[in-house]
Amino acid sequence: MDPSWYAIRTRSRHEKIVRDQLDKKLVEVFLPTIGRWSHWKDRKKKIDWPLFPGYCFARFIPDDRIGILKAHGVVSIISNSGMLSPIPDIEIESIRTLVESELAYDPVPLIKEGDMVLVTHGPLKGVVGRLVRKGAHARLVLSVDLIGQAVSVEVDASDVKAY
């Protein structure tokens, strides 16, 4: 059986510890990071933070999961109905290509058409609605379900987050 990529859920702020432990066990591990400025009273410094807090990725065969789970800081391996859920190689390689590039990137919540969203900026800040189209300009539907009526408005996609 060929090894696959899996998402490892870690304890809070243990992503680098888990990465280092799995690396010592010769497990192929990937922890995508993003540089952020941290400020103290006397200085500021750019620090690499996990791109996906609480997760790192490891490539292994399912029979080796016990060794993974025993690593300090590991909470679980993401699974569905008790079966480990592999991540397609192309998804990991795409993220690896991005973080190794010189492009600027930021994590964003994964929202899909049909999801309920909260407007976080602009004149509609605080408004909750259903996202019906996603793109540079998202189409948001606000409804009064009791009377079966709704109104649609266009908002900037960066101004909404999952509700």
Image (cartoon, rainbow, N blue to C red):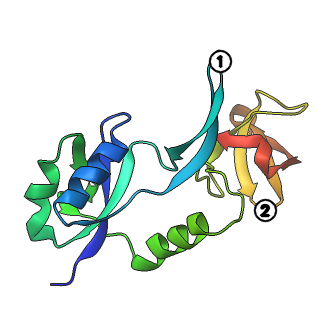
Q: Which residue is mark 2?
A: 135
Residue depicted at 33% across the width and 39% down the height? 14
Q: Residues within 10 Å of mark 1 (few under 14, many from 20)?
A: few
Residue 113 lies, in percent from the top left, at: 66, 58
* Secondary structure category for the residue under label 1: loop
Where residue 69 sits: x, y (%)? 15, 50
Q: Quadrant of the N terminus?
A: bottom left
Q: Position of residue 4 (x, y in %)?
A: 27, 75
- The residue pinned by badge 1 equals 42
**Is 105 on the left-hand or right-hand side of 151?**
left
In primary-sequence order, the first of circles 2 and 1 is: 1
- Where disc 2 sits, the SS reads loop
Query: What residue appears at the point 19 percent right and 66 percent down from the top-left corner?
Result: 26
Q: Residue at x 19, y 63 (%)?
A: 83
Q: Nearer the viewer, residue 24 or 69?
A: 24
Residue 16 visible: yes
Marks 2 and 1, how far apart at CA: 42 Å
- For badge 1, the amino acid type reads Asp
Between disc 2 and disc 1, the foreground one is: 1
